[in-house]
Image (cartoon, rainbow, N blue to C red):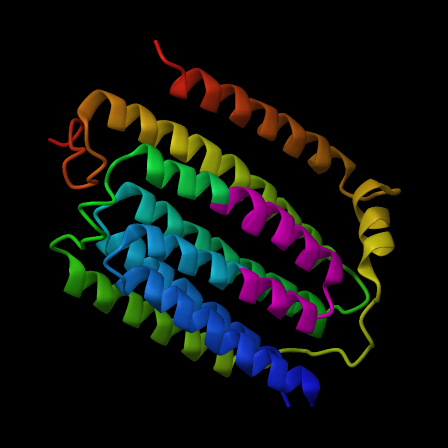
Amino acid sequence: MVGLEHYLLLSAVLFSIGLYGVLAKRNAIAILLCIEIMLNAVNIALVGFSRYITPTELTGQVFALFIIVVAAAETAIGLAIIITIYRSRGSIDATKIDLMKW
Amino acid sequence: MALSIGFWILAIIAVGAALTVVLLKDIFRAALCMVLTLVAVAGIYVTLSADFLAGVQVIVYVGAISILLIIGIMLTREVQQGNPTNKFRIPAFLVALVFFGVMCFVFLGTPWQQSGATPVTPTTGALADKLFGEDGFMLTVEIAGVLLLAAVIGAIAMAREK
């Protein structure tokens, strides 16, 4: 029987994969893809808690809805930034975007 | 029982597709695999009896965000250079592994106070009550609307040709 722990572990696995991708990727869009995976992992944990700990209240699902809203805004802004960087520098290699690095 | 089988199939699809996203050389195919992960997560919501959230996931993530990301990949000609990793590949793997270990320790060690009540189905009406009803999340909904408006205006202002 599948319980709360299964969903939490699935969420942890997906979050770790996303974390590895965010830290190790060079392409800025690949980093955005991995951030989306991390946000989805958090949503699975929230909905899992909502289902198994407070099944009659839907607060966890409301949280997940707001995370989806913020993720949409974040993707739009992130892509706008990436396209602006690509236009001015000709590359979106995250290791070469080091103008503010001392 | 059917719920368990569905969970295991969807979990394997989600984790496999997420691994493909980080391991594949081709960034475009990596984006398509991320879409597969998002669809599998929508299925996971169905097994958690969150039907409205599954619909929102399909519409917003699979329908909108993934298209936006694929357009971004096509607008920036990084497709030829593939999906390389930087020099922190092994430290990043170790960090992810340590994080996963800590999460497992916490998740399996905590005595969760689970409730045996049957979940609300369908959730659409109950969620609407929660969002727009008395002492709900009305202010947060309005703030989310302002956030989306600001994000759209900011994205247009940044990405516009000068």
Tell me residue B21's x, y (percent): 34, 60
Q: Magenta residues, as a range?
A: B39-66
The picture quadrant where one finds residue A98 is top left
- Up the image or down, B38 lies above or below B110; here it is above
**Residue A19: x %, y % from top left:** 34, 59
Residue closest to the eye, B121 or B30: B30
Q: Is A88 included in the stretch rendered in magenta?
A: no
Using the image, determine if residue B156 lies above or below residue A36.
Answer: above
Q: In the orientation shown, which residue stands out farthest toward the top? A: B162
Query: On screen, A11 above or below A97?
Result: below
In the picture, the quarter occupied by the C terminus of chain A is: top left
- x and y, in percent, of residue B69 in the image: 42, 42
Residue at 54%, 40% (x, y): give it.
Answer: A72
Q: Residue at x 85, y 55 (%)?
A: B126
A11 left or right of B126? left
Task: Say which residue appears at 54% left-offset and 25% top-offset.
Answer: B152
Q: Is residue B41 located in the magenta-colored stretch of the structure?
A: yes
Q: Quadrant of the N terminus of chain A?
A: bottom right
In the drawing, does residue A7 fall left or right of residue B89? right
A62 relative to A83 in the view: left or right: right
